Amino acid sequence: MKSGVLKLPAFSLRLKLTLGYALVFILASVLGAVLIYLVASTQLTRSLDTTLEETAAVALGNIGREDGALRFAADLNVRSELALELLNGQGQVTAQVGEKEDLKLGLPQAGFQTVQDWRVYSVPLEGGGWLRVLRPTDLLSGLLETLARVLVGAALLMIVLSCLGGYLLADRALKPIDQVALAAASIARRGAYRERVPVAPGGDELTRLSTTVNAMLDRLEGTIEHEKSFTRMAAHELRTPLTTLAGRVELLLDRPRDVAAYRAGLVQLQERIGALRALSEGLLSLARTDAPPLLERVELAGTALGVAEDLRPEFRAAGKILYLDVEESWVQAEPEGVRQAAVNLLQNALKYGGPQVTVRVRPGELSVADGGPGPRQEDWPRLLHPLERGPGVQGISGSGLGLAVVAALARRWQAELRPEWSERGFTVTLHFPEGTG
Ligand SMILES: Nc1ncnc2c1ncn2[C@@H]1O[C@H](COP(=O)(O)OP(=O)(O)OP(=O)(O)O)[C@@H](O)[C@H]1O
Ligand SMILES: [Mg+2]
């Protein structure tokens, strides 16, 4: 595993978030500015046009004909910035009020026009001719120009502020993630699996992230501690018989002996080695129960028959009878594991049970009834732990691993190990969950 995780890419996500926030703000401010400009320009032009229309309406009431030519009434008063013109049917100016520049206007058209910084409103007159009202647009364009400048300035300021705000927001959002990542990296670097990352307050996604990381560390700690204690226990358990074995060999070799004495010594050693092998095999079986289970369909009756056949000679040698009472029964488990569990339970029945032992298989269950008194009820939970043995079994070979292996296997299959004490004797049942076959 690489341990160089401590150096975090300081800006990548921050920069992306900042740019994302800023882009949204920039688009919003540019769009806002353009909208304000358009609305203002339409409104101002409309108010200018209204003035032109109103002036035209007043002027229309003050038009007369003099020598066949159109004229304004003498008392017609117009605002200084406006100019009024009367035109004949050919488009020639016949009367004029107010000042105006020389504009290239061409033939009049009804309605509004903008010509060289002037807004022009032309109204056709009854009986021919035109009334034209004109007003310079410089005031309007001046206003719009100022507005545009203000808006561009405001938009630029908004862009700067939004970049800054975006960065601050991104920084605030990412800081707790940095803290979790740094803490996790430091834990990984030092192998300090007992430490935890700080839990972000607020009950949000970040809290979930930190609690999930911590839950993962909890699981890891559990697994590591379990492995450690298993290794310690195995080493401890193997040391004692190995020391005894070494002592016996030394004793045997300390002086010359006759063949019979050597033979007796070797037989003793063989027994010890057998016990040692049983212990190491038990430890190995227990260690294997840590691997993830690979479940498949297993038929219990067939497995029980096979195990019974294998153990029959041992039962016969001990003068005990092994009965079988089986029905076909399919469960989800592991074939080798089921075999091992049946062997362990039958060996216990052989060692601690009465003279008649029955293996029974029913749908979803395998039980061993040994006709003996069984262990003490209060001892049962303890006996399911590795290396635990009941009182008064010193004379019987065993290392206290058989039931621990069965219990661990049952957990892998979500099966239950149920003991039962009755007047007919002790029975242990391996009960598989419903409908798993
Ligand atoms: N059928 C039984 N009747 C009475 N006592 C039992 C029975 N099965 C188990 N026990 C008690 O539980 C203890 C633990 O059993 P377990 O099978 O784990 O270990 P063991 O038989 O002592 O050794 P191993 O199985 O490793 O050879 C036994 O030492 C015994 O005291
Ligand atoms: Mg046993």
Image (cartoon, rainbow, N blue to C red):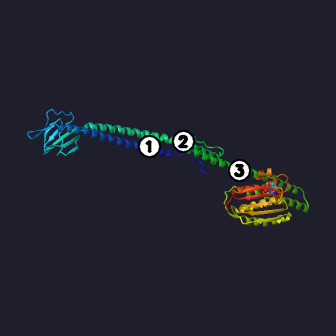
- Find ligand 1 in the image and state its quadrant: bottom right
Quick one: label 2 or label 3, which is nearer the N terminus?
A: 2
Position of residue 266 measured from the top left corner of the image (x, y, whole percent): 86, 60
Q: Which residue is mark 3?
A: 226
Residue visible at 67% across and 48% down in the picture: 221
Using the numbered discs, state the Cα–Cα distance from disc 1 to disc 3 in whole angstroms: 52 Å
Q: Is residue 111 left or right of residue 18?
A: left
The residue positioned farthest toward the left in the image shown: 67
Secondary structure of the residue carrying numbered label 1: helix
Using the numbered discs, state the Cα–Cα distance from disc 2 to disc 3 in whole angstroms: 35 Å
Identify which residue, 6 or 259, lies in the foreground: 6
Whether residue 403 appears in this view of the structure is yes
Residue visible at 85% across and 65% down in the picture: 317
Residue visible at 80% across and 63% down in the picture: 358
Whether residue 283 appears in this view of the structure is no
Q: Which residue is mark 2?
A: 175
Q: Which residue is mark 1?
A: 22
Q: Amino acid at mark 1?
A: Ala
Position of residue 153 measured from the top left corner of the image (x, y, whole percent): 37, 38
Quick one: label 1 or label 3, which is nearer the N terminus?
A: 1
Q: Amino acid at mark 3?
A: His
Position of residue 308 measured from the top left corner of the image (x, y, whole percent): 78, 65
Quick one: label 1 or label 2, which is nearer the N terminus?
A: 1
